Image (tube, rainbow, N blue to C red):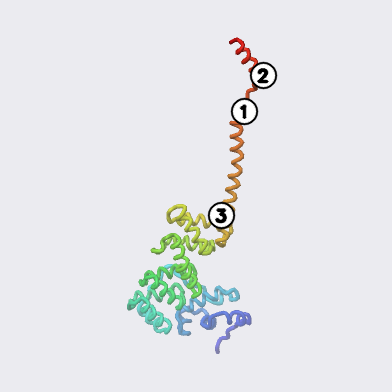
Amino acid sequence: MAREICITNEFIERELPLAPPLYVSIYLMTKALESSDASVIAKRLNVLESDVLRAWQYWQERETVKTHDVPQTRIFMEQRPEYSMEELSEYMKHREMKALLQTAQKKLGKPLTQQDICMIYGLYDWLGFPLDVIEVLLSYCVSDGFKGMRYVEKVAMAWAEEGINTLEKAAQYIEMRKTGFHAIMRAFGQSGRMPVDGEEAYMRKWMKEYELPIDVIKMACERTVMQTGKVSFAYADSILRKWKQAGVKTQADIENLDRAFVAKKAVRSGETKPVAAASKQNRFINYSQRQWDFDKLEKLQREERDKW
């Protein structure tokens, strides 16, 4: 006799419309095959084991699902697993994975080695990227002139650390780097080269942490070069940090700050002038003058003439 599975109305009404259909199937199969590991669930549903792990992770993160309903697992490891050719051959039977490998081969412009296939599958199984995000990642790296899988994997690990795991997030990142980074480097007069890691860290901070528009960032970069005569991301950061604290959002805000600074400087200059004038007056005008008796002087002059 088949074992019954209890599912609450809350789960059906609130979770089913939101969850991917595959995750629903994995959830139901997990409850049906209680205490089974991911490989058993994957085999019964004819899906990848990594799909089961991601589904479990999804349900663990849903507040309405009790954590004991799905096995606890850690799906992200510090190092990519090594997949045997037998494992890869099994995974390549899936139509979607086979199509991804064919696409990767076209984008990279060369036949894929076993190591290449291992690394591409690792993006899916290890880092948990959806297949469409992996395609975007490959296109992004190739457009930058990099066709080596080690470089692709390095970029993928950076994406994973930043949580870039959807098409929307990938598009935002590419737009930020392609448009934002390029505009900033051009403002520094450095459009002919790629930014190094430290420079990228500054630019990401300005755009994501400070949340400043590109036009405002460009003004800070241009002022940095004009005032220092060199490219200094640290100096530009000091300008942008002050602007952020002052609530700057637009170029008009910067112009208002500039006018306020000039006015304040003029007031200070005006306060010092009367002091200088007073000092000058006290020194050359306000001195004790001698008092002369001109009548007496005239009498003395007459007496002197009479003697002659």
Q: Tell me the amino acid under the disc marked 1.
A: Tyr
Residue 295: which numbered mark, if any?
A: 2
Q: Is residue 294 above or below residue 106?
A: above
Percent x, y for residue 124? 44, 76
Side of 63 where 98 appears, left or right: left
Label 3 sits on residue:
258
Front: mark 2 or 1: 2
Pick whichever of labels 2 and 1 is earlier in the sequence: 1
On the question of residue 273 being in view, the answer is yes
Per the image, the residue denoted by label 1 is 287
Q: What's the amino acid at mark 2?
A: Asp
Front-lying residue, 146 or 50: 146
Q: Is label 1 or label 3 in front?
A: 1
Residue at (46% x, 70% y) in the render = 174
Q: Element at badge 1?
A: loop
Q: Residues within 10 Å of mark 2 (few under 14, many from 20)?
A: few
Left or right of 14 in this view: 82: left
* Vertical placement of residue 206 versus 38, above or below: above
Residue 62 locus on image (x, y percent):
57, 74
